[in-house]
Each structure stands twice: as C-alpha cells, then as structure tokens.
Amino acid sequence: MTRSNILITGASSGLGAGMARAFAAMGRNLALCARRADRLTALRDELVAAHPGIAVHVRELDVDDHEAVFTVFRAFREDLGGRVDRVVVNAGIGNGAPIGSGRFDANLRTARTNFVSALAQCEAAMEIFREQNDGHLVTVASIAALRGLPRSMTTYAATKAALASLSEGIRADVRRTPIAVTTLYPGYVHTELNSGSGPLMVSTEKGVRAMVAAIEKERANARVPAWPWRPLGTALRHLPLSVISRFT
C-alpha cells in the first residue's frame, strides 16, 4: 500500500529530516512540524526544489503544547486535501540524570516530551485515522526501551518503554481494522542529539534507510538497523543487570 500523505513530527533535523528526504524521494507529500520554523522552511525549499512534483507543508509545533498538537494535525489534514495516510511520532529529547541526583527537572522534561507529548500525538493521529477508517501510525521508540538502564538513561529508557507499550495497546485495539501501527526501535544512530561514536554507531543515512524500509513494510515492530540490533536487542533483554550497568 502506498501512503501518499505523510506527517512527521520533530522533522527539522536528525532522523525526522532524514525520513522526510527519503519519503520525498519516493514522491510522497509531506506535512512537517517542529519547533524550529527556520529549519523547516529551509528543508521544505530543499525538498520542493529536488522533487517538484510533491507538496510539502510545514508548521511550527512544540509537541509539549498538547492543544497545539491537535490543532496542527487537523490543519495538516486540510493542507493535504483532507487526508493523512501516515503519522510518524518522532519528536523527542534525550536529556536525563540519575534518579535522586537533584535533576528532577531534567527527568520531568524528558518524561513529558517523550511520553506525555507522544501520547498527545498518538491521540491526534488516531482521531484522524478512526474518522478515515484507515492510516498508519509509526512511533519511534528506542533499543533502550528493551531494558531499564542506569544513570542518565534511566528516565529516557522508561519513556521509550512506555511509548512502545502504548503503541502495542493501540495496535491491539485496531487490529481488525485497516489501521496499522509500527513501533521502531532504533539502535545507536548518529544525530545532533546523539553525537557519540563507537563500533555500534551508524550514520544518520544508514539509520534512516533502515527505518524507512521497516515503515514501508508496515512491520509491527522493528529493531533497526537489523544488524546488529536484532540479536543485540535479544541479548539486551536477557543479560544480567551487572552486565547492563557496565555497557551503558
């Protein structure tokens, strides 16, 4: 099935912008939102110049403004001719601190953006899909969702696990309908938010290719890139905490 009209949140940089470029190259129409309007405008101009046959609409959106999420999604639906075929819930942050270290503010911000605001995006997307009786919801979790992790990763991993659980619940709720739900579990992908290095880190381009391929297949769950994260994800779920604490 071709999903012609695709809405992506957190689209001004990183994985969101990369997915926008990939889908634009496939001839898809795009609705892109993020906080940084200047970057969105530049991305729109780039995509329309490279692919003049597509429509690209952009709107500024802070996903922590939950009322605005619903307003922007509904406006995008009108921009795209009354139909949204796919929504990619991609916006998120990676900040966090060890629990009890005095940085509840950082952990609260991560929890709010990565889960509560993701919930708002899922609600807004599913409202549209239920009205259409069709659509594809994609949530971007993380390989970190597979285990509780220590130090600065504790809250981040918990939010991504919650998002994965939310996605599975939605999938169960609509499994006998034309609505599909995909949960992505990216491994270590180089982005502005994740600029580390190491043997398991892959480029933004490779990460995006794997994500878009899984999205197009509309798989229920996908650890991406498949190598090495399918086997490593399985190991991550079963290794003892004494080992996990040394590798994160």
Image (cartoon, rainbow, N blue to C red):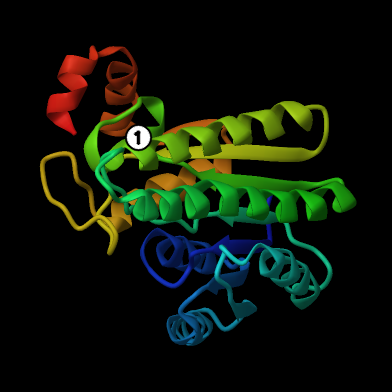
Q: How many marks?
A: 1
Depicted 48 relative to depicted 69: above or below? below
Q: Nearer the viewer, residue 187 or 244?
A: 244
Q: Residue at x 57, y 71 (%)?
A: 32
Q: Tell me the quarter of the picture where residue 15 sits.
A: bottom left
| Res 98 quadrant in image | top left
Give the crowd class for mark 1: few <14, some 14-19, many >=20 residues within 10 Å: many
Depth check: 163 or 81 in front?
163
Which residue is label 1 attached to? 144
Q: Position of residue 95 (x, y in %)?
A: 32, 54
The answer to whether residue 143 of the structure is visible from this angle is no
Q: Is residue 71 visible?
A: yes
Query: Residue 190: horizontal and vertical position, in percent?
Result: 24, 55
* Residue occupying the point 16% across, 53% down: 196
* Image position of 121 with respect to 5: above or below: above
Q: Nearer the viewer, residue 157 or 89?
A: 157
Element under disc 1: helix
Residue type (three-letter) at the residue carrying disc 1: Ala
Task: State left or right for residue 133 relative to residue 107.
Answer: right
Q: Position of residue 101 (x, y in %)?
A: 24, 43
Q: Is residue 205 left or right of residue 127?
A: left
Horizontal and vertical percent position of residue 147: 35, 25
Query: Measuring 19% from the left and 34% from the top, which residue is drawn there?
Result: 248
Q: Residue at x 45, y 87 (%)?
A: 38
